[in-house]
Amino acid sequence: MPSVSFEFYPPKTDDQRAQLDRTATKLKAFAPEYVSCTFGAGGSTLSYTSETVRHLNQKHGLAAAPHLSCVGGSREEIRELLKLYRAIGCRRIVALRGDLPSGMGHPGDLRYAADLIALIRAEHGDAFRIEVGAYPETHPQASDALSDLRHFKAKVDAGADAAITQYFYNADAYFHFVDAVRKLGVQIPIVPGIMPITNFSQLRLFSEQCGAEIPRWISKRMQAYGDDNASVRAFGAEVVAALCERLMAGGAPALHFYTLNLAKPSTQVLKLLGSH
């Protein structure tokens, strides 16, 4: 079984908190190396992120890594957050540029993830293992693929320890990306991000926003199933498990699952992997 990690988002209501507890309990059975916790643009879930990280650590015994974004935060606010995360026992941070929400004017003091990484390293040395984002199919806002690779290398040069990719369904995109950055001298582990397929219309919307391509053959099969959710889930689990197998066979160091705070989609894929 591959080494795994899971991404959660911070719950805001009692029902969402109960859902996260159920999910964390079930996924803990797969002995994740760590779990990450997102945060909303513009600091909307700032306090929720630190509360959730603390909760996952203390209640579930999971090594929780907060996402930290440049967006909307001053240097001082970021410094305070880093102190807080260190104080509550975080040893890993996912450092991202973040996306400016529409209508929000202030991008924050730091422009790029590389600036954020440099700040973390300057103030905390090696206290945190720093994970960064990677885009096998190119960042949606990049001017071209080569400039995107250069931005990625800048994050590594600033002190990143490992990378987690945006999700994708074309294994070749991942392998080509890894080959390209290795040629630039980047040696850090690049962990593929895995998005289980459950709700196709939601996935299509996500994918349009973040620039992930859904292969035509998958789209066509999903459309054929229509409202037959059981078939969509079964097909989705098989497709994603086959993708994971190919990635692991090709040398991927681990798998990072985007859970959307649900246990079943990731569990179905991991059980298929375990049975093959």
Image (cartoon, rainbow, N blue to C red):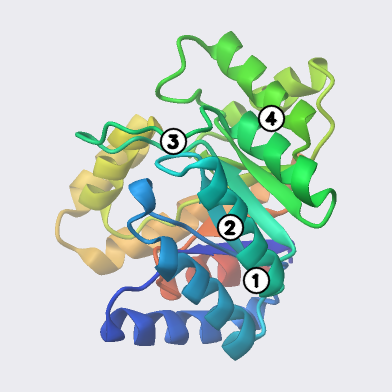
> Residue at the location (21% across, 49% down)?
201
Q: Is residue 265 visible?
A: no
> Alpha carbon of mark 3 to alpha carbon of mark 2: how far?
15 Å
SS for tag 3? loop
> Alpha carbon of mark 2 to alpha carbon of mark 1: how far?
46 Å
The kind of residue on which mark 3 rests is: Gly
Q: Nearer the viewer, mark 2 or mark 4?
A: 2
Read off the residue under disc 2. 80
Q: Earlier in the sequence, mark 2 or mark 1?
A: 2
> Residue at the location (59% across, 67% down)?
270
How far across and down, in percent of the image, does residue 71 sit? 43, 39
In the rendered image of this protein, does residue 33 appear above or below residue 44? below
The residue closer to the viewer here, 133 or 69, is 69
How far across and down, in percent of the image, does residue 19 sit? 36, 82
The kind of residue on which mark 4 rests is: Lys
> Residue at the location (59% across, 33% down)?
113
Quadrant containing the C terminus is bottom right
In the rendered image of this protein, does residue 244 appear above or below residue 153? below
Badge number at residue 235: none
Q: Nearer the viewer, mark 3 or mark 1?
A: 3
Mark 1: few/some/many CA within 10 Å (<14, 14-19, 20+): few
Mark 2: few/some/many CA within 10 Å (<14, 14-19, 20+): few
The kind of residue on which mark 1 rests is: Ser
Read off the residue under disc 4. 155
> Residue at the location (78% across, 41% down)?
122
Mark 4: few/some/many CA within 10 Å (<14, 14-19, 20+): many
Read off the residue under disc 1. 275
